Amino acid sequence: LETYFENSKRSYIDLNNGVNIPKQLIGNALKERVQSIDHETCEAGDEDTFFVADLGEVYRQHMRWKTNLPRVKPFYAVKCNPDPQVIRLLAKLGTGFDCASKAEIEQVLKAGVEPHRIIYAQPCKTNSYVRYAASQGVKQMTFDNTDELYKIKKLFPGAELFLRISTDDSSSLCRLSLKFGAAMDTTTDLLALAKELDLNVVGVSFHVGSGASDPLAFMNAVQDARTVFDQAETFGFNFHTLDVGGGFSSDTFDAMAAVLSSALDEYFPSNINVIGEPGRYYVACAFTLACHVIARRTIADEQSGAHSYMLYMNDGLYGNFSSIMFDHQNPVAQVLKTGERFYYDTMASQPTCDGIEYSIWGPTCDGIDRIAESIRFSHDLDVGDWLYFEEMGAYTKCSATRFNGFSDSHDVIYVASDPGAKAMLGMN
Ligand code: PLP
């Protein structure tokens, strides 16, 4: 068995017989689940959308991180996908966790993670959550403005603070520096106030934006962080940790990691700890979503005599496809099953250039609830058929709503395509 880090998407292959093990496991799990449903008689909800999560993919991404960024200790960004088995695996692998709220801190603590492995990485925090963090000994937290410093002075003066600086995140999918991060011309004033308040600032944090695509964003941010480390020294602080945030994607990781590593080596001596807050990188490719076609509307073109279809699925923009809205994603439908036949992982599952035209819609009453404006398949898809969508692990189920009374929590079937993950989790 060989693992290829360069292109880690489902790359765990048995070289002897050419089997792509992750694909095979995911396909079997999808098929087994769909076959277990009697579509004629099932109860409401039995044919609900569901995920298959490959924890082996999460495990391999961790190994890949350690290979490419050995200096940077990952603190998984829980907000991206607070799946309990993902948290459990990462906790066993020894990562830290980036939490944004009391509920996330609580979840991670309950998973047995020690408070020092948590950073409350939200620069504008709720008072009662700060008190909760203090009561649990979760000391590491970020700030980027004077009001937050007064808040922390009052509620948790013993906190270990990271000054979050803003970055040029213009190349990213989701810009965060519009909302958070101190401008570089404000950092000395913030450090001066922190000193005056006798607060313990221990480092700098930044985030280059989620889904970042320009490696130079990391280079520039590391340089700015160096400037703030030097400023801090003049105020008598002894900074020991740099937090390089998230923004990593599976596709661009190797290039990003190379630039980040060399920037770190150039600007930060080895006695400085470096942590990161990857979210998407760990989970995006690990989750596959299966959706059921609940209705179909035929659209006839009277002039040409041709027809296309509107397909309505049991999941949409207000559900697990919230990533279309909030995360600028474009999930691609593939055919899982039509009639009694399964097509997972064959050419016939793929959209085609010709074939029958479909638009794909979610189940709510809202017109924006559309997943695909136009997609073609060679199949005659109808009610009762199933579609699947890969790479649905990041910013999907965590931002699903109950709009129109649909469920916001769906079954997850776990598989592990890597013996390492299996052994750690005690899976068969
Ligand atoms: N850290 C912070 C403070 C964030 O706000 C986010 C995402 O919004 C992340 C980490 C995770 O980012 P990503 O999923 O791009 O790695």
Image: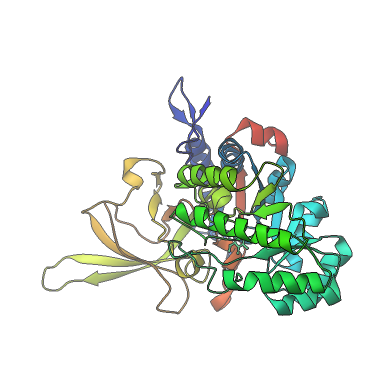
Residue situated furthest front in the rendering: 234
> Is any atom of residue 36 visible in this view?
no
User: Residue placed at 70% from the left, 72% from the top?
Assistant: 190
Q: Nearer the viewer, residue 300 or 51?
A: 51
The quadrant holding residue 70 is top right
Q: Position of residue 414 (x, y in %)?
A: 62, 45
Vertical side of 383 occupied by 52: above or below: above
Q: Nearer the viewer, residue 123 or 330?
A: 123
Residue name at image x 11 percent, y 73 percent:
303
Give the quadrant of residue 375: bottom left
x, y (%) of residue 210?
A: 52, 60
Seen from the viewer's position, the closer of residues 89 and 170 is 170
Q: Residue at x 73, y 46 (%)?
A: 91
**Residue furthest toward the left?**
303
The answer to whether one can see residue 24 in this image is yes
Quadrant for the C terminus in the image: top right
Left or right position of 347 against 270: left
259 or 54, nearer to the observer? 259
